[in-house]
Every structure is written in C-alpha cells, then in structure tokens.
C-alpha cells in the first residue's frame, strides 16, 4: 500500500488504523497531500468581490492545507484584529469622527469578519471600529477559549488601540454577546454602552430544560463534527432563512472554527446575565429576531440600571441570522448609530 505524510500534521496516510486520519486528500491550491482531519478543519468557500448569489452550495466548499487556507481566507492572518478608521472627510459625518470606537465581537465558530461590512457602513457615519477574534477562533484558533481569556483579549486590545477620552461601545453577537456579559462585568468602567445581539435566550446555569438540551445538542454537534461538516449543516439553516448579506465574505469565506466547540458551550452555560446586568452602569441596546429562541429578553432589559437609554428591538420575521438579513441590517446599524450618539 502506498503511503504518504500529511503536509500539516505529518500523519502517515494509508498505513494506520484511523480511517479519518488515513483518508488522503489534496489541497485545492497547491495539491499537496493532506489527511481528512486537517482538510476538514481547513475548509471554506473561496470569496471573490462578485459574491456568488444565495443560496450558497455545499459543493462550493474547498479543502486546503493550512498555509493555503490562511492565504485564501478573507481573514488577514498577519494580525489578530482589524481597525477600520472613519471614512474620508467627504464621506463621513464629522461629528462622530475619532470620538467613538465600536468594538465588534463575533458569534460562535465565526471570526472578526462577521461584522466587517457592518463596521464599514458605520465608518461613513464617522465611527472607528475594532473587530476582534475571540480566543479559539480565527487567527486565535489555537488560544484556549475561556471567559477570562476573552477578558484579557479585549483588555489588551483596548490598551493598545484606545485612549481614555474615547467612548467605547461593545457590540457582541450570539457567543460574543454571552461572553460579553462577563467581559462587561469585568471591564465595566471601560465602556460607555453595549449592543448585544442574539442573546435573548437564557442559556446560563439556571436555564430552562429546553435551553439545557439545546446546549447539550450544540456540544454534541461541535465536538463530533468537523468544521467542513458544520459549515455544510449551517448552509442548510441559512438557506432556510432569508439571510443574504455578505454571507461568503463574512462567514463561509473566512472559515469555521469549532475546534473548541465544547469550550464555547461551557462559556455560554457559565454566564448568568441576571447576576451581571444590574451591576453595569451604562445603557444596553438589545437586538433579537422574533423567530429566534428568546425566553429572557424582557428580563434582561428590565434589569438594566440605565433604564432611560436601554432598549430592546425585535425584528418581526427575523431569525438567529437577522443581522445578515438585508431586510433588517441597515435599520439595525442606524439604530446603533442613534444609540451611540445618545450616550454622553
């Protein structure tokens, strides 16, 4: 039997007992030999500016060696976060220029590309944005994901990129919102406000049996399926939805990162928003889709200390992917603009 070694993990392919490791594939770019495990970890849909129309197809997913994967991905692997400055003076609203920084934190399995077009849109309103990779995701995929590591990641970037005179707005989606409760509780004085998206369901220690089952099921999926398989499964869900906003650029073209799927579930199930929200001194703007799970959104809002400026917007017909649904995106971004301006 002919054998060869995977260019990434150096596993001998064709001579061992592990079928998954011993399945031989070739990188879609350099054609070097890779095992099925590495190939499935490094899978994405190549992105071009003329993004293919939705629905996206599983047949578009390509597998790569690690080096080519990082080259093809929409993520820039030379750094771990992106800074988008306000647009040129002739495009931007000068009132906000350089005074407010938006810190964007993505959802589980994603990366900082998730909110890239959203940040570009708000740059034309004069906002500076920082988009980060959470530990265990994107360029930090090999960093252990814990709640305290999330705090350290955010704090280190703020110290490098922000000044004490700037207003900083935390914007987190799904996992970035649930870990955001914890981050905001630890770094309360460093933020002027927060926007939390897709976190209307209580999945913490005191969650319902239904939510507890959901966490268990997500853990099973993320720990037993490869990134490629999960991307294919997610495409099926997205294609049932009306999500259509820069999907390949922000999600499928960056790649999926569920290597630490169990840790993602641990983080969400550890955080108790009801214990944290009353301690936060700043207002919170919540966004959810009406079709998403949301058993605690009213409770979260009622616990906000700043009741005058805190609010909840639920998009009728929106699901968990509503922030990539062109029916709602610009309204959401305009509301974020108005909210950030209202906070002194």
Image (spheres, helix red, strand yellow):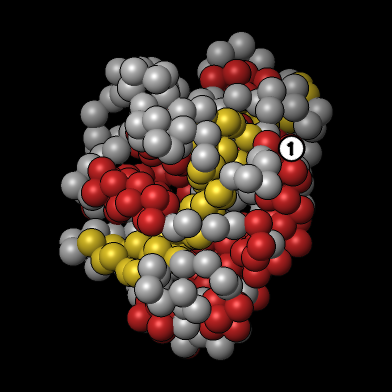
Q: Residue at x 36, y 27 (%)?
A: 92
Would residue 217 appear left or right of 179 to someone viewing this image?
left
Rendered position, 266 above or below 344: below
Q: Residue at x 47, y 87 (%)?
A: 208
Residue 162: x percent and y percent? 66, 40
Q: Residue at x 50, y 59 (%)?
A: 193
Q: Quadrant of residue 8?
A: top right
Q: In the structure shown, which secondary structural element does the residue marked by tag 1 occupy?
A: helix
Q: Residue at x 35, y 31 (%)?
A: 93
Residue 25: x percent and y percent? 60, 26
Label 1 Cα neighbours within 10 Å, binned few <14 / some 14-19 / many ≥20: few
Q: Quadrant of the N terminus?
A: top right
Residue 118: x percent and y percent? 38, 38
Rendered position, 53 above or below 265: above
Along the viewing direction, whichever of 328 and 94 lies nearer the viewer: 94
Residue 114: x percent and y percent? 46, 41
State the residue position of label 1. 160
Q: Quadrant of residue 67?
A: top right
Q: Would residue 90 be visible to someone looking at this image? A: yes
Rendered position, 70 above or below 281: above
Along the viewing direction, whichever of 239 and 297 lies nearer the viewer: 297
Q: Would residue 21 be visible to someone looking at this image? A: no
């Amino acid at each position: 039997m002919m054998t060869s070694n995977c260019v990434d993990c150096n596993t001998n392919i064709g001579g061992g007992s592990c079928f998954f490791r011993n399945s031989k594939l070739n990188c879609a770019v350099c054609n070097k030999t890779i095992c099925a495990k590495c190939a499935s970890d490094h899978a994405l849909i190549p992105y071009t500016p003329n993004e293919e129309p939705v629905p996206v197809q599983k047949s578009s997913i390509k597998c790569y060696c690690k080096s080519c994967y990082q080259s093809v991905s929409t993520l820039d692997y030379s750094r771990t976060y992106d800074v988008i400055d306000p647009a040129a003076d002739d495009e931007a609203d000068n009132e906000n220029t350089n005074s407010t920084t938006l810190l964007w934190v993505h959802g589980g399995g994603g990366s900082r590309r998730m909110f890239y077009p959203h940040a570009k849109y708000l740059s034309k309103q004069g906002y500076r944005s920082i988009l980060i990779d959470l530990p265990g995701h994107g360029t930090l995929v090999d960093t252990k994901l814990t709640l305290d590591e999330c705090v350290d990641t955010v704090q280190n970037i703020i110290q490098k990129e922000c000044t004490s005179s700037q207003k900083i707005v935390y914007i987190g989606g799904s996992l970035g919102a649930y870990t955001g409760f914890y981050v905001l509780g630890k770094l309360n004085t460093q933020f002027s406000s927060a926007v939390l998206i897709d976190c209307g369901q209580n999945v913490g220690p005191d969650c319902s049996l239904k939510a507890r089952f959901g966490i268990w099921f997500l853990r099973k999926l993320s720990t037993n399926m490869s990134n490629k398989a999960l991307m294919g499964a997610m495409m099926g869900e997205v294609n049932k939805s009306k999500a259509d906003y820069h999907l390949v650029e922000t999600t499928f073209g960056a790649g999926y990162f569920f290597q630490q799927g169990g840790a993602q579930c641990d983080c969400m199930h550890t955080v108790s928003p009801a214990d944290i929200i009353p301690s936060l001194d700043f207002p919170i703007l919540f966004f959810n889709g009406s079709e998403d799970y949301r058993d605690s959104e009213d409770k979260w809002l009622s616990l906000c200390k700043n009741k005058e400026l805190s609010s909840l917007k639920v998009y009728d017909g929106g699901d968990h992917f509503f922030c990539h649904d062109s029916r709602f995106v610009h309204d959401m971004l305009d509301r974020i603009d108005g909210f950030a301006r209202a906070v002194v």
